Amino acid sequence: MIRWLYLGCALIFVMVVIGGITRLTHSGLSMVDWKPVTGAIPPLSETQWQNEFEKYQQFPEFQKINYDFTLEEFKSIFWWEYLHRLLGRLIGVVFLIPFLVFLANRKIPEGYTPRLLLIFLLGGLQGLLGWYMVKSGLVDVPSVSHYRLAAHLVTAFLTFAVTFDTALKLQFSGYEEGHASLKKYRKEMIWFVVFLSVQIIYGAFVAGLKAGLVFNTFPKMGDSWIAEAVTAMSPFWKNFVSGLAGVQFIHRYLATGLLVWGLVYWFRSKNEPLGKYQARAFNYFGVTLGIQFLLGVITLLMKVPVFMGVAHQAGAFLLLGTCLFVLNRTSNKVKKVTPTLVEV
């Protein structure tokens, strides 16, 4: 069962990576309808491909941007979106069938059925939000709403988080010998995850607004620490939810704050008598945090090439995973017992 949950985490991770490629290659609006069942079969003949292309031609992205696309160019963007949706369907099947088998055979540990149902519902919601996001780009402006993009991405992170946390709880049946001071580390990590969640939302805003293509300097925004464009919009608050400069401003400086906070947190943990897996959790967190910050800076300086944009998004997933590992290993339920690690 633990392997099954970790497989789900891996598939969600891959899906988000492919989703990032789909977004950065401008492939997300290539499929203009949503067929949860029959849509699993791609065009198999030139006639079917031509029909799909003609559907695409009826919408703003073709009419305003890709009006000179050939059928072969259309195929190149279609496949990324198709693969993204197909993987979403695969994740649903990989989750549902084993879940029903475990349920029928009473193999689900007591108290975990509601968690597993929540994971399934979150997965379904994520798919619905994906189509809701795509629909926003099939109207006058051929660009998806950055708010809907954020909702779609955050739901993927949330699904991953619940799945990974459940797997960790099942895998570690006992706790390492701990001490009371680790409770403060757990509480602080909870707050860190709250601010990291805000950072992830702003990462989605930056992606949706293509705000990573402006002020491609670091640490300053051009020649200033706070560019004039940050506060150029009216009303003032709109700068920080819809303005390219304002959204990037929040994202870059919140990243810097999280880096400093996280590294101090990591170095403080070195003074604690940690168990084996506790030490691993803190070390994974510190290293992943540093790498993710560097990926963000390089992505900005390079004006968001596909590879770096995808790597940065994947790094956020890994960072969240290490935070969850720290939370698991600093549980305030630590007992003075030798840990028992359940076989995966």
Image: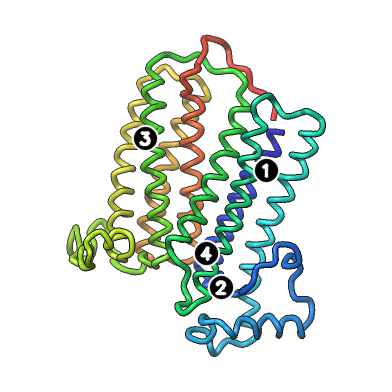
- 65 or 3, which is in the foreground? 65
Residue 247 x %, y %: 32, 60
Pointer 1 residue: 7
User: Element at badge 3?
Assistant: helix
Does 313 sit above or below residue 100? Answer: below
Does 42 sit above or below residue 61? Answer: above
Circle 4: residue type: Met
Q: Residue at x 70, y 39 (%)?
A: 4
- For the residues labelled 4 and 2, the Cα–Cα distance comes to 10 Å
Q: Residue at x 52, y 72 (%)?
A: 26
- For the residues labelled 4 and 3, the Cα–Cα distance comes to 29 Å
Dot 4: few (<14), some (14–19), or many (≥20) neighbours within 10 Å? many
Pointer 3 residue: 191
- The answer to whether residue 227 is left or right of residue 68 is left
Circle 2: residue type: Leu
Quadrant into which the N terminus falls: top right
Dot 1: few (<14), some (14–19), or many (≥20) neighbours within 10 Å? some
- Label at residue 29: 2
- 39 or 87, which is in the foreground? 39
Label pair 3/2, CB-CB below 8 angstroms: no
Which of discs 1 and 2 lies nearer the camera? The answer is 2
- For the residues labelled 1 and 2, the Cα–Cα distance comes to 29 Å
Query: Along the polypeptide, which appears first: circle 1 or circle 3?
Result: 1
Query: Along the polypeptide, which appears first: circle 3 or circle 2?
Result: 2
Pointer 4 residue: 133
Does 92 sit above or below residue 51? Answer: above
User: Element at badge 1?
Assistant: helix
- For the residues labelled 1 and 3, the Cα–Cα distance comes to 28 Å
Query: Along the polypeptide, which appears first: circle 4 or circle 2?
Result: 2
Residue 97 x %, y %: 77, 44
